[in-house]
Image (spheres, rainbow, N blue to C red):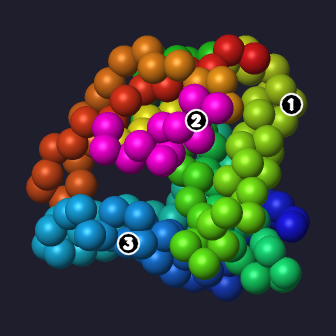
Amino acid sequence: MDIREISNSDEDIETLQKISRQTFTETFGSQNTAEDLAKFLNEEYDFDKLKAEVENPETFYYFCYFDDEPAGYLKLNIGSAQTESDYPEALEIQRIYVLRKFQGKRIGLAMMQQALTKAKELNKSQVWLGVWEHNLKAQAFYEKSGFKKVGAHVFVLGDDKQTDYILLKTL
């Protein structure tokens, strides 16, 4: 297993776009309408939007490779890149996604460790994230990693307003 920072090359952005769409669809596709899913995928994983995010100095993207194949990715934010302004001195884990065929190989755990390492490098005392209220598997993973529920916010998927729990870990 190997974790590498994503570059702003067109090849990396195209790989990020592909893996983002695939992992999100695998994880949430069956629980949402095709229309909402398509709208979300087209807006959130647009090539130019992803490229701008990768180039943002307050956002950090990583691929996790398993047997030299991209198996998942991690997106971290600090400062104004965070999706909520309630934790200005913390690091946000915005996305930890693993392709279905690689699940169970401890890739999520490796990416979580990368996130915590980055938080420490940046002298952050807290890490937070949002997780869908119906994603019980992810909630259990985050709880095992030491995160505690501290609130909730609205996450819009297409035209559907959903509830994400806000989880926080103090380092």
Q: Residues within 10 Å of mark 3 (few under 14, many from 20)?
A: some
The three-letter code of the residue at mark 2 reads Tyr
Q: Which residues are magenta?
A: 133-144
In the depicted view, which residue is nearer to us: 54 or 69?
69
Q: CA distance from mark 3 to mark 2?
A: 21 Å
The three-letter code of the residue at mark 1 reads Glu
Name the spot of residue 75 as percent of width and height, x first: 61, 51
Q: Which residue is mark 1?
A: 121
Q: Earlier in the sequence, mark 2 or mark 1?
A: 1
Asked if 60 appears above or below 46 in the picture, the reply is above
Residue at the image point whose x is 31% and y is 44% from the top = 134
Quadrant of the frame with the C terminus = top right
Residue at the image point whose x is 68% and y is 53% from the top = 108
In the depicted view, which residue is nearer to us: 10 or 143?
143
The three-letter code of the residue at mark 3 reads Thr
Contact (CB < 8 A) between labels 3 and 1? Answer: no
Q: CA distance from mark 2 to mark 1?
A: 21 Å
Contact (CB < 8 A) between labels 3 and 2? Answer: no
Residue 100 on the magenta segment? no
Q: CA distance from mark 3 to mark 1?
A: 32 Å
Q: Which residue is mark 2?
A: 142
**Left/right of residue 130 with respect to residue 8 in the rendered view:** left
Quadrant of the frame with the N terminus = bottom right
Asked if 125 appears above or below 32 in the picture, the reply is above
Q: Which mark is residue 25?
A: 3
The image quadrant of residue 100 is bottom right
SS at circle 1: helix
